[in-house]
Amino acid sequence: MTYVLAEAEQKRYLSFAADVEVLCIDAANFAASIAAERFREIIRGEAGSFGAVFDDKSFDSIIDAIESQKAQAYFLVAKWGVYQPYIIGASLHFSSIITQRQGDGFRHIPAPYIEDICISRKLLSNFMRETDAFFPKNCELGACFLSETARLSAQACHNETTRFIGEYAANGKMIINVFRQLNSNLGAIEDSAVLEISHLVDIMKDDPDLSICTKELGNEFYPKEHITHSNVFIISWVDEVLKESIVASFSNTISTFSGKSVIRVQITSNGCPEDEYKLRKVIFSLLAAGAKEAQRRLWISNQSMMRVHAFNEPPIVQALKDMGAAPRLLGNNIMLPVIGGI
């Protein structure tokens, strides 16, 4: 345990290294564990703080995803005397990828999509009150939690980098500060967006009429696993004459608040069609092909939606909005994409 002499009096202070740690709870029998109930309590409280709706019954689908190892849950736990461990925060990760431009093509980097990360003020206050322990005022607990979950997630997937993908509220000063401490790239409202498309059934009615290619993520992305990753696939469009290309990656996730299936999409370009109609046609074809592939993989239900990330892609953001995609809101907060790397 860590004892720090304060200026005015001696208090028991908690340090991240000695008294707080991040744990990935064993997925087996997760539903029956105290961690599952703490997780539900943390997410319910977070939804309330944003004025968002929390579906308690549908949260069972999150528990099922963790038990089936479709998702990974990480917990921030404090320990002090008999209080060991005491869960004060939780985070939910899904396997995904980051796509970046590289020369005339693209580079795809395995990375977790952080669906949610939260430290419960209520549980933290309860722990400090019951133990008479304190965190130093300059303790960046959020940054420590996020960086450690990224490290553990990379370790579990044999990734060489600890990058991650997520979202942040445009007016969320605390989480913005955490992301900036970890040298993250924050999407700006002028050129980036997280947009939602709910009419997947309508999208799948039309056949894409452009030349597109579906690609599995296999050994070239996960050389140490030697498997095809069932949670992610890529669809691309290329104009060989004009040297234009757009790629969309699709990941299977679930919303922690609603418990509904969410297809997380990232669209990245390496040269966009200047013609607005053609660009909308290309994007629609990519999304239609992606929706059909997701349906083939049994990712889609009647209530599924797509959540599209466009990072530093002004023409694509505008094209998606013209197609009817709506800004992703958390309560009344506009959400934007973030790509982190430690």
Image (cartoon, rainbow, N blue to C red):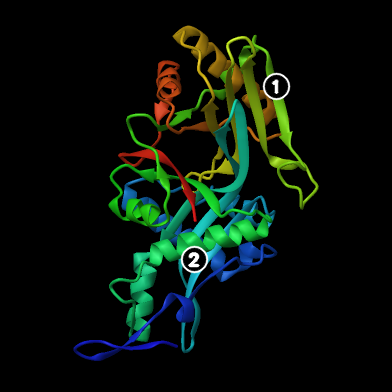
Residue 212 seen in the current view = yes
Residue 82 x, y percent position in the rendering: 48, 88
The extreme front residue here reads 103
Asked which quadrant contains residue 174, the reply is bottom left
Up-down: is 278 above or below 227?
above
**Around disc 1, counting alpha carbons within 10 Å, would you say few (fewer than 14), some (14 to 19), or many (20 or more)?**
few
Q: Which mark is residue 243?
A: none
Closer to the chain start, of discs 2 and 1, is 2
Residue 263 seen in the current view = no
Q: Which mark is residue 213?
A: 1
Up-down: is 258 above or below 35?
above
Circle 2 SS class? helix
Up-down: is 117 above or below 28?
above
Q: Residue at x 68, y 13 (%)?
A: 211
Q: Amino acid at mark 1?
A: Cys
**Left or right of 151 in this view: 217:** right
Kindly identify which residue carries mark 2: 38
The extreme right residue here reads 226
Q: Residue at x 77, y 43 (%)?
A: 219
Q: Residue at x 77, y 51 (%)?
A: 225
For marks 2 and 1, give the one nearer the viewer.
1
Q: Amino acid at mark 2?
A: Arg
Q: Residue at x 52, y 9 (%)?
A: 278
**Around disc 2, counting alpha carbons within 10 Å, would you say few (fewer than 14), some (14 to 19), or many (20 or more)?**
some
Residue 27 x, y percent position in the rendering: 67, 62
Asked which quadrant contains residue 155, the reply is bottom right
- Give the CA distance from mark 2 to mark 1: 43 Å
Residue 93 x, y percent position in the rendering: 56, 52
